[in-house]
Image (spheres, rainbow, N blue to C red):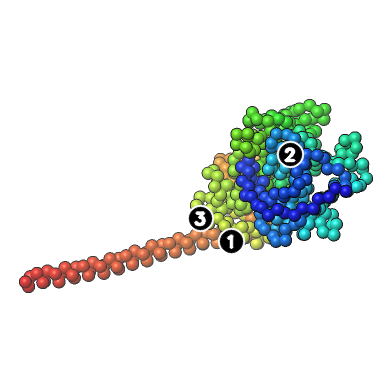
């Protein structure tokens, strides 16, 4: 058995945050120095690697032990075992990097938290495993007794387990995360996913039979906010990323549509951003030595599902304004009245609908009612506990129902769209009273200020005039 025991070399280097895609954040990177830690050869079964986990938690800590790499000109692919500080704990994972970009990670959907140590082992039975203390298994390939002989990384970035005649028994390409690499294929009904930090929502890029689309997921609610369809309603079988674009193919393997790159440089990967939920194709710029976007699905901030915070409206100037205060410049956007949104309130006597004319939403594919009036649309939402907002189209007589107040944006008033938000009854009147109260306070303050100015001004005038009279009297007496 080949075994390596590693401890972290006490050296930290501040890495520059990649400018190409905001969803990959590299904080402090710890490089592990050891004789066999960076090799081009395959990893044979029986291999075992042990990494010591830091005793104290340090925010931003990322430590990597690189295992194998491809022989391409940089940036090339590298496989590594990583320990990362997350949520007050240390997460251990197997990952693939293209240069400094993480393109695959074993803990994408479920993190494996460890203490003391993390062990990577390719067992004699051919199962690739990540283990913590007491041999607790946190991740495995599930290839035990399938004839696996070694672990390889291919020039495409595909991490594979192969048998003695190089037949693939397991591959990372079968478990997509938030990145699709050049040469990789994704079949219908598969998807990429990304998870915004400190949020219960997540994004997905999905390959469906008649389209590819981006979705926002919030609990059990799913809303699309971008799509691309082949012409003539042709069906999709799979998609593949080529050098000059993303191709869509039918059951016979014939290309039926393509999203083209807008740059001459060959594409390297497709990414679903975890902060914005935007889809982008990336090439490598040798001059700038980083990855740059060749194509973005969404180019306007207001067309992103979370371009603004919940309960905010994205305006024509790409700024965010609180719902109900579209024309007011907000200095403090920390409280946009989300407490007034009557989530879960039932009963006609407790809630009402706040109307926002000239406001729409980027979210689609939710429940919809047709051939209804505005009043019927509002009444339906009031009586539905799960409804927190609706979008009514007076031109189409359609009512779109929402369980979240997100993706709201300003539109032309002549569009005939009216966005209505469910609020606690009396909120609209309360808002008017609060505004009136503010106005009264301002008016009182102005009046008080004028009175004070007049009083002090009169007193000053009296003192000056009195002093002049005394001065004249003295002159006359002399």
Seen at 56% across and 49% down, the residue is 320
Seen at 91% across and 47% down, the residue is 125
Judge left or right: residue 162 versus residue 474.
Answer: right
Question: At which x and y percent is residue 373?
Answer: 65, 46
Judge left or right: residue 110 versus residue 477.
Answer: right
Depth check, mark 2 against mark 3: the one in front is 2
Q: How many marks?
A: 3
Q: Give the structural element (helix, strand or loop) at label 3.
A: loop
Residue, disc 1 = 426
Find residue 54 and report its image quarter: bottom right
Which residue is more in the foreground, 148 or 352?
148
Compared to residue 157, the image places residue 306 above or below, namely: below
Is there CB contact under 8 Å for labels 2 and 1? no
Mark 2: few/some/many CA within 10 Å (<14, 14-19, 20+): many
Mark 1: few/some/many CA within 10 Å (<14, 14-19, 20+): few
Per the model, the C-alpha gap separating discs 2 and 1 is 60 Å
Which sits earlier in the primary sequence, circle 2 or circle 1?
A: 2
Per the model, the C-alpha gap separating discs 2 and 3 is 47 Å
On residue 79, which mark appears?
none
Residue, disc 3 = 331
Q: Give the structural element (helix, strand or loop) at label 2.
A: strand
Depth check, mark 1 against mark 3: the one in front is 3
Is there CB contact under 8 Å for labels 2 and 3? no
Per the model, the C-alpha gap separating discs 1 and 3 is 25 Å
Seen at 14% across and 69% down, the residue is 471
Q: Give the structural element (helix, strand or loop) at label 1.
A: loop
Residue, disc 2 = 77
Which residue is more in the foreground, 320 or 247?
247
Task: Tell me if residue 346 can be seen.
Answer: no
């Amino acid at each position: 058995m080949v075994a390596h025991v590693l401890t972290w070399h006490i050296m930290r280097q501040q890495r520059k945050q990649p400018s190409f895609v905001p969803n990959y954040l590299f904080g402090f990177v710890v490089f592990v120095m050891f004789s066999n830690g960076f090799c081009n050869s395959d990893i044979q079964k029986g291999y075992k690697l042990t990494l010591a986990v830091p005793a104290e938690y340090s925010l931003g800590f990322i430590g990597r032990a690189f295992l194998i790499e491809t022989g391409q000109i940089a940036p090339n692919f590298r496989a590594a075992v990583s320990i990362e500080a997350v949520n007050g704990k240390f997460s251990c994972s197997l990952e693939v990097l293209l240069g400094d970009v993480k393109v695959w990670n074993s803990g994408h959907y479920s993190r494996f938290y460890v203490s003391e140590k993390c062990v990577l082992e390719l067992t004699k039975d051919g199962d690739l495993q990540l283990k913590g203390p007491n041999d607790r298994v946190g991740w495995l390939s599930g290839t035990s007794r399938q004839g696996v002989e070694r672990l390889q990384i291919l020039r495409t970035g595909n991490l594979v387990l192969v048998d003695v005649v190089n037949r693939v028994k397991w591959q990372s390409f079968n478990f997509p995360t938030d990145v699709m690499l050049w040469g990789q294929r994704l079949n219908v009904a598969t998807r990429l996913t990304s998870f915004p930090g400190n949020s219960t929502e997540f994004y997905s890029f999905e390959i469906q039979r008649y389209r590819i689309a981006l979705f926002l997921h919030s609990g059990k609610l799913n809303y699309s906010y971008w799509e691309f369809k082949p012409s003539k309603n042709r069906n999709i079988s799979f998609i593949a990323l080529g050098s000059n674009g993303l191709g869509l193919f039918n059951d016979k393997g014939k290309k039926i549509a393509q999203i083209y790159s807008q740059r001459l440089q060959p594409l390297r990967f497709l990414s679903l951003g975890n902060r914005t939920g935007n889809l982008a194709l990336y090439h490598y710029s040798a001059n700038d030595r980083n990855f740059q976007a060749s194509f973005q699905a969404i180019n306007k901030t207001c067309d992103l599902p979370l371009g603004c915070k919940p309960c905010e409206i994205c305006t024509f100037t790409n700024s965010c304004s609180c719902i109900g205060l579209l024309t007011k410049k907000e200095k403090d956007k920390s409280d946009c009245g989300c407490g007034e949104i009557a989530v879960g309130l039932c009963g006609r006597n407790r809630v009402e609908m706040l109307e926002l004319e000239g406001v729409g939403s980027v979210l689609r594919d939710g429940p919809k009612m047709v051939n209804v009036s505005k009043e019927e649309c509002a009444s339906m939402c009031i009586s539905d506990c799960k409804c927190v907002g609706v979008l009514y189209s007076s031109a189409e007589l359609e009512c779109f129902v929402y369980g979240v107040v997100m993706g709201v944006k300003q539109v032309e008033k002549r569009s005939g769209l009216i966005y209505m938000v469910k609020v606690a009854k009396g909120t609209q009147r309360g808002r008017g009273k609060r505004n009136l109260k503010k106005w009264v306070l301002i008016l009182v303050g102005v009046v008080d200020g004028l009175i004070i100015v007049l009083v002090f001004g009169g007193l000053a005038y009296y003192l000056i005039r009195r002093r002049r009279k005394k001065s004249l009297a003295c002159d006359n007496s002399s």
